[in-house]
Amino acid sequence: MQTNDKSILDLMKDIGAGKIQLPDFQRGWVWDDSHICGLIASITQNFPVGAAMFLEYGNDNVHFKYRMIEGAPKSDAKPDFLILDGQQRLTSIYSSLCSSRAVKTKTDKGNPITRFYYIDIPKAVDPSVDRMDAIISVPENKQMTSDFGRKIDLDVSTAEKEYENKLFPLNIILDSVKATQWQIGYMQYYQADPSVCQEYLTFMSEIIQTVSHYQIPVITLDKETPKEAVCQVFENVNQGGVSLTVFELVTAVFAMDDFELRPDWENRKYNHLNGEVLNIVTATDFLTACTLLAAHDKGGTVSCKKKDVLNLQLADYLKYADILTQGFEEAENLLAEERIFVSRDLPYTTQLIPLAVLCALLLPDHRIKQSNVKTKIKQWYWCGVFGELYGSANETRYVNDVVGVMNWLAGGDLPKTIVDSYFNPMRLLMLQSRRSAAYKGIMALIMKNHSRDFISGQEMDFVRYKADGIDIHHIFPKNYCKSKGYDYIKWDSIINKTPISYSTNREIGGVAPSIYLARIEKKVEQGDLREFLTSHWIDMDDCMTDNFEQFIINRAKKILDAISNATGKPISGRDSDEVKQTFGDFI
């Protein structure tokens, strides 16, 4: 990495010649008219405007598609450098101080406009005038009007009118030939008036020379810089703006082979990955999964860290993207079987990646449709959820799980996630909001138990889930528990919550269970009501007698049994002294 000051003249010449270009992942520039005026004002006063960062271009390590910056002439030149940081400033400088075309910018409210920029000579040399007041932005036709266009307030549409208004066109300030020609015409217009000549000499000295000699600090990364470092650098320097994703970089890489990744991804997203669960899948998630799938299918070392995704080959993407898309769809179907219907109820969004890859690997020979295979996939999935293992360091776990599960299915040892999974019974009391993966997992298990609405008796399948406004509510109501002084850590935990329809929750209200169940019994046969409650692992007798402590014990047992059944692992510590002291009995 090198840091040098470079003259604005040299930088603009190199931009115009195509020696300095933008990587294709850079967004279009978005500076508005007032920002451009402020930038020009700073440069004319020799104020710093910040450093630019370039990437040396020229080897296979950095192989991005590139493009000229806005306002520069078209060129087939291969760049020597790509702009990583400073695009908006450099584009604004080039388009306003070098280009013969009007600058495409926008108003403060975001409306698109085109502008030419001038500097007022008398105001620019008057030290009492704020420099911003000397920078004039005019429409493309070089006329400023009022009264709905009927009155022309300023007209600089010809050189003579520029002379008349003493407005110097800033887009020639760095072109010594054009600036000299303008100066000759200006002097002739005023017939070499001594005061005008002196004023212009001062303008040349204080403004034109200042701009011509202006220096911009440039940090240059050499061409050996790896793509993952480029991505990290870009993220660091753009913390206040739109961050660069792995997807943007891979898009630029694939574009060199004339493949448009973005439309391809958008098509997949719109037609295949837009379901209630898959709508959360990002483009980078898809590329990570594709990298993992390709690496596993090829054999050898499997990895899907950022550097691996950035080095994904177009041939591999084309080979695996379709089957991976099907893998994601199969994963969504599998999750629906487990009663995870929408993305907000997905315990770990990250676990979708290895799940989709596993489904993709098992699709060609239809093994994902086999009951024994699917059972093992589900066991691995729930171990990840209830072991709460997908919170960090996910790339390594993705690899361990995909490799481990596939080996397990082939007769090998248990995968790492199943081995590592552990659920502490005391954790039930800590699960109080749906932000927790285990909390969401328990709710899914309750619905998988064919839980039924307390009043209608309808099972909470996907149709009922969407139509009836199913949400999570207290069984012993919140207000009732508060009035009784019950321990908050118990009554607001997952143990005292269950999925209930909106209408049924209104029926429950804030009264004791014995009271609201008596109301419900007027609409439901007692035997049916007991069955409905049992489907939620709720003991009806505990509720009819308002026995809160026994209810907590009995339901905690049922939940732990369900977790053990889903993970295929016994839950240790259910008979510990801590559990007995906290719950009043073993669970």
Image (spheres, helix red, strand yellow):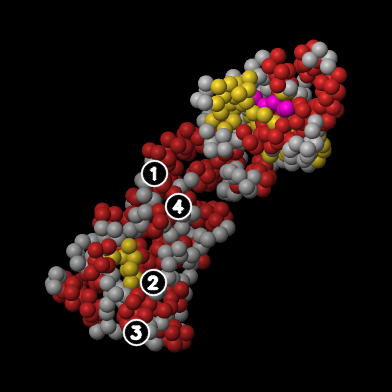
Amino acid type, callout 3: Lys
**What separation in Å lies between label 1 and label 3 (alpha carbons)?**
46 Å
Give the number of the mark in front: 3 or 4: 3
Residue at x-position 64% and y-position 28%: 137
The answer to whether residue 117 is magenta is yes
Q: Residue 66 location in percent, x, y?
A: 63, 29
Q: Which residue is mark 4?
A: 352
Q: Which residue is mark 3?
A: 484
Residue 39 disc label:
none
Query: Dominant secondary structure of the magenta stretch?
Result: strand
> Earlier along the polypeptide chain: callout 1 or callout 3?
1
Screen quadrant of the C terminus: bottom left
In magenta, the rendered stretch is 116-120
Give the number of the mark in front: 4 or 2: 2
Q: Nearer the viewer, residue 196 or 313?
A: 196
> Earlier along the polypeptide chain: callout 1 or callout 2?
1
Give the number of the mark in front: 1 or 3: 3
Screen quadrant of the N terminus: top right
Q: Which residue is mark 2?
A: 494
**What separation in Å lies between label 1 and label 2 (alpha carbons)?**
30 Å
Residue at x-position 18% and y-position 77%: 518
